[in-house]
Amino acid sequence: MRIADLLEETYTALSTNKARSALTILGIVIGIASVIAMTAIGQGAQASIESSITSAGANLLYVSPGQQRGVGVSVSAGRGSAQTLTQDDATAIQSSISLVKAVEPEVSRRYQITVKGGNTNTNVIGTTDAYPDVRNTQVAEGVFISSADLQNYNRVAVLGPTTVTDLFGEGSDPLGQKIRINNMEFTVVGVTAAKGGSGFQNPDDAVYVPLTTAQRYLSGDKYVSSIAVEAVDSESMTTVQQQITDLLLQRHNISDPTLADFSVINQADIVATASSVTGTFTILLASIAGISLLVGGVGIMNMMLTNVTERTREIGLRKAIGAEESDISMQFLLESVMLTFFGGAFGIILGWILAWGVQHFGFASTKVTLETVLLAFGVSAAIGIVFGYYPARRASKMNPIVALRFE
Amino acid sequence: MIKLENITKDYSNAGETVKVLKGITFTIKDGEFVAIMGPSGSGKSTLMHVLGALDTPTGGRYFLDEHDVSSYSQKDLAHIRKDKIGFVFQAFNLLPRATVLRNVALPLIYARVPKEERDKRAREALLSTGLSEDRFEHLSNQLSGGQMQRVAIARALVTNPSLILADEPTGNLDTQTGELVLETFKKLNAKGHTIILITHERDVAEHAQRIIHIRDGLVVKEEVSKN
Ligand SMILES: Nc1ncnc2c1ncn2[C@@H]1O[C@H](COP(=O)(O)OP(=O)(O)OP(=O)(O)O)[C@@H](O)[C@H]1O
Ligand SMILES: [Mg+2]
């Protein structure tokens, strides 16, 4: 049979029972749409996590105290637990490794912050004047911590925009105001620009103070809780990582690298870990949606089997007048593929609308990729073939005489 | 040329074997118009299925134009049907929701004939059976029995087969319409088609040149028709 004739026969057959065809297509539409929407949610989460990691600055390495316990957990595991890193380590990294562009040591801990008529509990970060460059942060109002502040142990503070709102209310001007951290008075000298972060380390909800001031008045010791190191470019990241490790091992008098009392993590490793987590999440969501696709496929098979039985005489007749087995099986296979093709097309459109709606109404950020669409299309075509194969084969193998006698 | 040599056909159902054809031998020359006659249950339809390459015999040999069809596979049988044979079934077997033209053109689809030519040949076939042209675009389930049978005949001859097999083609028609259909077969025969007509009615069989009588799966008598 020629392709054009095959398509015409298929169209005629499917349009004969429009309601049944439409309901069968609906099963596939729902399946494909949910796969598209779920994958879009997963990939949206992945994209937003990756962007929040990279918005922390480019070409960054993080040095934290304590042993590395695997990428990911160690991001915050060392904080406050082991105290092995000092400001001197940071200075040494800056001065002896040439591929290092900037170093930003910090000590951070949560404190209760109070002002007249308000209070909040947030992250207080003792840091240096390198912070805005290294962490890719802009100052919206006032100034950031200066080297003079560091030298003079000045009690000045720069607030994140969220903290400003929490303490002083929406749209107020905090510059020059006094805030109390751990019952010590600090003067607000600046406000950082909003970065739109979220989660456990929101850069918009933080109080930045000079590192020296924090060590003297807040933590009371010389240790730092992490050192962010910016390499000159992305190619030198691994070299810098190794050089920092070597340098700190030597400075801490440790000969066995497995016993290191610090860890150096690459930003790329964090992105990779986060991606693998969100990737698993995406697969999980897509698999749940895939089950409904499977149900849709079973619906196709059910309809096609009914179809074959109902049209037994027709099959017998077609065979009697010259149809070969391949003609019959192609006809029925094309019917099921056509159903899943339309189901897939409508499903992609519906899934896209759903994904858009989820983002538009602020439930989650979503991302529909070309690969997802192509994959969904491929999967729906494959479902048509897989679930249409058995009914089509059954039709093609029918004995023409038995079929003609069928009532 | 059709040559049957001791054709047998058994059906086995639930361990029990029914012998339907018990050794049929006859020859039909090209261009003949032959009736196969016999009482109900004598095996006429079964014989037609074998003659029409719809089924393979259990035993014996069947030569169709020198091909030994009795040993053919399903695939080869399909080719034989497509190339050489046209069927007219007792129950018409038209596609109900397809137009008359489409029904008649259907065998040509499987013969990979292009659309324009299919339409042309389907029209010619329909006109030769005497169906009026204003019915061509009607759905086949909107026709009368006699009209349906003409469509079925047109479908059988559209591929210009050398052999046309008709199983009780007048069984569902009144005498007058039946006569018209039988006249159509005579005209086709005059054009050179070999025609095998299966019937249990003497009057119908008389339209053929030769009558082969079968009973209980055996040929009991062969006679030359009076006309
Ligand atoms: N698939 C089958 N399985 C078992 N027995 C069958 C089968 N097909 C036909 N028969 C038997 O074969 C015998 C002949 O059947 P057939 O249809 O050839 O008769 P017929 O001569 O065409 O009769 P009628 O004039 O009523 O159409 C019948 O007894 C029937 O029961
Ligand atoms: Mg019969």
Image: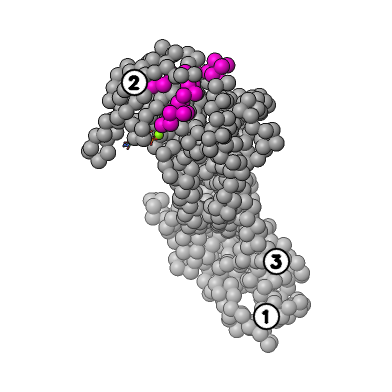
Residue type indicated by callout 2: Lys
Q: CA distance from mark 3 to mark 2?
A: 106 Å
SS assignment at label 1 = helix
**Which residue is at the front of the view, A115 or B216?**
B216
Segment tinted magenta in the rendering: B188-212
Q: Is residue B196 magenta?
A: yes
The disc numbered 3 marks a residue on which chain? Answer: A
The disc numbered 2 marks a residue on which chain? Answer: B
| Residue at the spot of label 1 | A167
Rendered location of residue A373, percent (x, y): 60, 47
SS assignment at label 2 = strand
SS assignment at label 3 = loop
Q: For residue A194, which numbered disc appears in the image?
A: 3
Residue type indicated by callout 3: Ala
Task: Name the residue: 39% across, 55% down.
Answer: A259
| Residue at the spot of label 2 | B221
